[in-house]
Image (cartoon, rainbow, N blue to C red):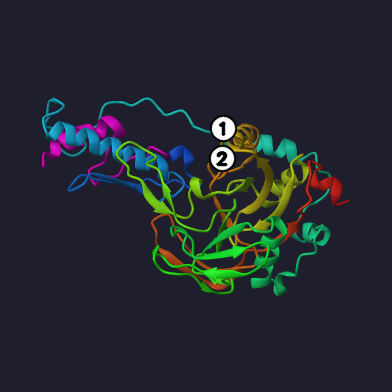
């Protein structure tokens, strides 16, 4: 292994790399949480690999890893001639790199305040819950039945919804929206599912895939140079209807974000909490194809990004918090897990399967 050569190639791709291997993530614009100086780590021994503690940048990091490995392999095998430079030692800076332009419109607190200011009354979670078109249970009464109510209300008979207690799994449970029956899924393709209720809680909460799926394994085509096709249950080839997009914000203050949601002329079918600091809203799109859904997504990113919407979360294949479930703890940016003193509820506060473009503030008077 030629470390100097590998380091040179990595710096050309990633910019400055500190002596411990930390650098700026190439997908930093897609991060949905706070950024830290030690979020992204590069390992050059063995198979060169870039790691990031954030998950929203996964596709970009995967693509960067593929490019990095391809260029290093070509250089080390003689396919790409490169001069090898000796660096003077610790503290030597890399060549200046132009700042990256943000991929999405940045959050603008003044824009959010201007929009929320048009709502002349306080908007709280309780206020929304009291006016929900479909009656939602009180927080103390929410549980497994709430998740079942949510899925059977928002998905058509015969459609199947994946539910997750492990964010990076291929789905841990599957519910048929028509029958309300659910099963526990195996991690291996050859193992049959078993009947099971939906989970009531998860170590970091419970999620669902926002768009319905076939419920079985399908091949996911290679998505980046150097990647390979693989089996999965949660990728685009598994989706059966391009129905929903997720609006969430980790940046906007809750009261202002709720006011903005109430003013938007969008078919918002549900609003729920994450069991943390964000509030999730599900918007019905009913696109004929992923291409059509992506076009709607691009418009929403431009208009709602400045209001604090997480633009990376506006995607066709996205996990959202399943209402009615408990979140037992969380991981910090470094991946350290901390259990909550008391579980927090992913609370359902608004449910309107028949939503149209009438703003919620007009429905909830």
Name the secondary structure under disc 2.
Answer: helix
Q: Which residues are magenta?
A: 1-27
> Mark 2: few, some, or many residues within 10 Å (few <14, many ≥20)?
many
Q: Is residue 348 left or right of residue 80?
A: right
User: Residue 311 got which mark?
Assistant: 2
Q: Look at the image and tell me whether residue 15 can be seen.
A: no
Residue 187 lies in the magenta-colored region: no
Which residue is found at the position 26% from the left and 26% from the top?
Answer: 95
Q: Is residue 110 left or right of residue 84?
A: right
Circles 1 and 2, Cβ within 8 Å, touching? The answer is yes
Q: Position of residue 55 (x, y in %)?
A: 44, 50
Residue 9 lies in the magenta-colored region: yes
Name the residue furthest right: 365
Q: Is residue 123 left or right of residue 207?
A: right
Q: Which residue is mark 1?
A: 105
Vertical arrangement, residue 345 with respect to residue 362, above or below: below
Q: Look at the image and tell me whether residue 170 can be seen.
A: yes
């Amino acid at each position: 292994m030629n470390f100097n050569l590998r380091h040179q190639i990595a710096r050309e791709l990633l910019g400055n790399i500190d002596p411990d291997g930390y650098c700026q993530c190439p997908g930093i614009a897609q991060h949905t949480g706070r950024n830290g100086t030690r979020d992204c780590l590069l390992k050059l021994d063995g198979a060169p690999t870039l790691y990031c503690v954030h998950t929203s940048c996964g596709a970009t990091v995967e693509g960067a890893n593929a490019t990095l490995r391809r260029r290093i392999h070509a250089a080390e095998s003689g396919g790409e001639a490169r001069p090898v430079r000796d660096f003077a030692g610790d503290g030597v800076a890399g060549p200046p790199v132009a700042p990256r332009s943000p991929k999405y419109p940045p959050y603008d607190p003044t824009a959010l305040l201007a929009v929320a200011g048009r709502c002349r009354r306080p908007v709280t979670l309780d206020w929304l819950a009291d006016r929900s078109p479909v009656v939602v249970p009180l927080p103390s009464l929410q549980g497994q039945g709430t998740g079942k109510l949510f899925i059977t209300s928002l998905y058509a008979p015969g459609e199947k919804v994946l539910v997750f207690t492990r964010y990076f799994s291929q789905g841990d449970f599957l519910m048929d929206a028509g029958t309300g029956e659910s099963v526990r899924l195996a991690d291996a393709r050859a193992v049959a599912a078993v009947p099971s209720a939906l989970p009531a809680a998860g170590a970091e909460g419970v999620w669902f895939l926002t768009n319905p799926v076939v419920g079985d394994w399908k091949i996911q085509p290679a998505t980046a140079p150097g990647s390979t096709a693989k089996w999965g249950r949660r990728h685009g080839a598994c989706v059966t209807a391009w129905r929903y997009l997720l609006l969430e914000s980790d940046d906007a203050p809750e009261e202002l974000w709720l006011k903005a949601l109430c003013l938007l002329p969008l078919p918002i079918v549900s609003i729920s909490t994450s069991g943390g600091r964000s509030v999730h809203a599900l918007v019905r799109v009913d696109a004929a194809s992923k291409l059509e859904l992506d076009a709607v997504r691009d418009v929403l990113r431009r208009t709602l990004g400045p209001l604090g919407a997480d633009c990376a979360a506006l995607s066709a294949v996205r996990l959202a918090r399943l209402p009615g479930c408990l979140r037992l703890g969380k991981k910090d940016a470094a991946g350290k897990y901390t259990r909550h003193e008391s579980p927090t509820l992913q609370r359902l506060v608004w449910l309107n399967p028949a939503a149209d473009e009438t703003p919620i503030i007009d429905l909830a008077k």
